[in-house]
């Protein structure tokens, strides 16, 4: 990573990785090009940004001509963050969504039951997290909209079918299939340093159906055959084994903090629905989430929380902590 990248650059880069439309991508790349320090060490990256921008402009122009809508399927982000479920046929993706959310996708013992991506909301403590059920990825086929969904997700859950002899190979096929594209899975989310179009989405591995008698032996075999560095959560989506740990890790991986707001006149904050912001973000980000006018009109805030004394007066650059109570003064 070239040195001295500005916070604006890093923010645009993060948004670029998650952009769902060519127009959004273009906006982010333009900010990145503007913000990148101009010296020899970034020549390569500058050139790569410029060629991406030119390509996107052409793409947008030809989409306009063809009257095309934005490519792919878009699922509006909801809740504290988004996890996308991936896997081969029958791995148990739909079953997991059924077990963790109130959504009721069809679960069936035959492949390709799920044909459209479908979101459901998973409760965790006092927040909800969006889970997206998807059609299987196989050696021969992946729906083209899947790339945008994977890039846009905060994290991926890769399910392995321990209920069939083919499960391990099917998992490998998912990785191979994506590994040949610019949308890949990794232990952490990041953009490639040399090629900003190449995106990695952090992934948890979830070997499923551990309730079945042959499953432990297959799990062992999987460890021998696949050398994966993803954190592993062995589960039974149908029986609930391991799901509590998995839910907690999903929340942790979103890397967000919860903030409760209160009116200056109120004694108690609104505890029902916390706002969530990425860890490291500031009061200013929260203010603009609460109301679009608040970011510019914010004078100060009082904070009750783990990092400050009760009622401390802070400015827009205060970095929020999990479970802070914030009273905004505009
Ligand atoms: N024994 C067992 N069966 C499961 C489990 N999870 C899913 N299944 C079964 O596996 C089959 C495929 O599940 P489904 O959720 O439709 O898979 P998908 O294609 O990945 O969405 C169904 O018959 C499910 O009942 C599990 O944890 N244990
Ligand atoms: Mg399904």
Image: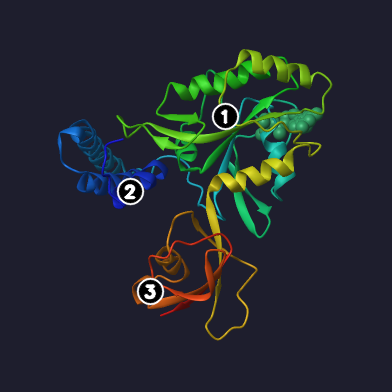
* Marker disc for residue 230: 1
Other-residue count near label 2 (Cα within 10 Å), few / some / many at <14 / 14–19 / ≥20:
many
**Is residue 106 visible from the viewing direction of this image?**
no
Q: Earlier in the sequence, mark 2 or mark 3?
A: 2
Secondary structure category for the residue under label 2: helix
Residue lying at 81% horizontally and 37% vertically, measured from the top left: 239
Query: Which element type, helix, strand or loop, lies under badge 1?
Result: loop
How far is mark 2 from mark 3, CA to CA? 22 Å
Q: How far apart are the alpha carbons under marks 3 and 1?
A: 42 Å
Q: Mark 1 or 2 closer to N-term?
A: 2
Which residue matches tag 2?
Answer: 12
On the image, the x and y values in percent for residue 196 come to: 32, 34
Q: Given contact means CB atoms under 8 Å apart, are the residues at marks 1 and 2 in contact? A: no
Q: Give the distance between the C-alpha atoms of the residues marked 1 and 2, in whole angstroms.
A: 26 Å
* 171 sits left or right of 23 in the view: right
Q: Nearer the viewer, mark 1 or mark 2?
A: 1
Please give the name of the residue rendered at 61% of the width and 73% of the height, measured from the top-left corner: 270
Residue topped by disc 3: 293
């Amino acid at each position: 990573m070239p040195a001295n990248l500005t916070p604006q650059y890093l923010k645009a880069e993060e948004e670029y990785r998650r952009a769902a439309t060519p127009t959004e991508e273009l906006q982010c790349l333009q900010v990145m090009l503007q913000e990148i320090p101009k010296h020899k060490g970034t020549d390569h990256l500058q050139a790569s940004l410029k060629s991406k921008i030119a390509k996107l402009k052409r793409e947008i122009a030809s989409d306009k001509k063809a009257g095309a809508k934005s490519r792919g399927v878009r699922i509006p982000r909801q809740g504290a963050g988004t996890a996308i479920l991936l896997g081969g046929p029958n791995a148990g993706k739909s079953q997991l969504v059924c077990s963790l959310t109130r959504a009721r996708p069809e679960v069936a013992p035959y492949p390709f039951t799920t044909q459209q991506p479908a979101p459901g909301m998973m409760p965790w403590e006092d927040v909800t997290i969006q889970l997206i059920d998807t059609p299987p990825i196989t050696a021969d086929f992946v729906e083209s909209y899947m790339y945008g969904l994977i890039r846009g997700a905060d994290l991926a859950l890769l399910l392995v079918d321990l209920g069939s002899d083919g499960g391990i190979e099917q998992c490998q096929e998912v990785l191979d299939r994506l590994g040949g594209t610019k949308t890949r899975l990794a232990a952490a989310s990041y953009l490639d340093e040399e090629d900003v179009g190449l995106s990695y989405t952090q992934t948890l591995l979830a070997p499923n159906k551990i309730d079945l008698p042959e499953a432990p032996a297959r799990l062992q075999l999987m460890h021998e055959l696949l050398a994966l560095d993803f954190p592993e959560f062995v589960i039974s989506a149908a029986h609930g084994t391991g799901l509590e740990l998995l839910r907690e890790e999903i929340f942790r991986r979103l890397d967000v903090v919860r903030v409760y707001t209160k009116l200056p006149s109120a004694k108690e904050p609104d505890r029902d629905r916390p706002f969530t912001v990425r860890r490291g973000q500031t009061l200013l980000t929260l203010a603009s989430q609460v109301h679009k006018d608040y970011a510019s009109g914010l004078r100060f805030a009082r904070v009750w929380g783990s990092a400050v004394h009760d009622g401390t007066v802070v400015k827009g650059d205060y970095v929020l902590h999990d479970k802070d109570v914030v009273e905004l003064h505009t």
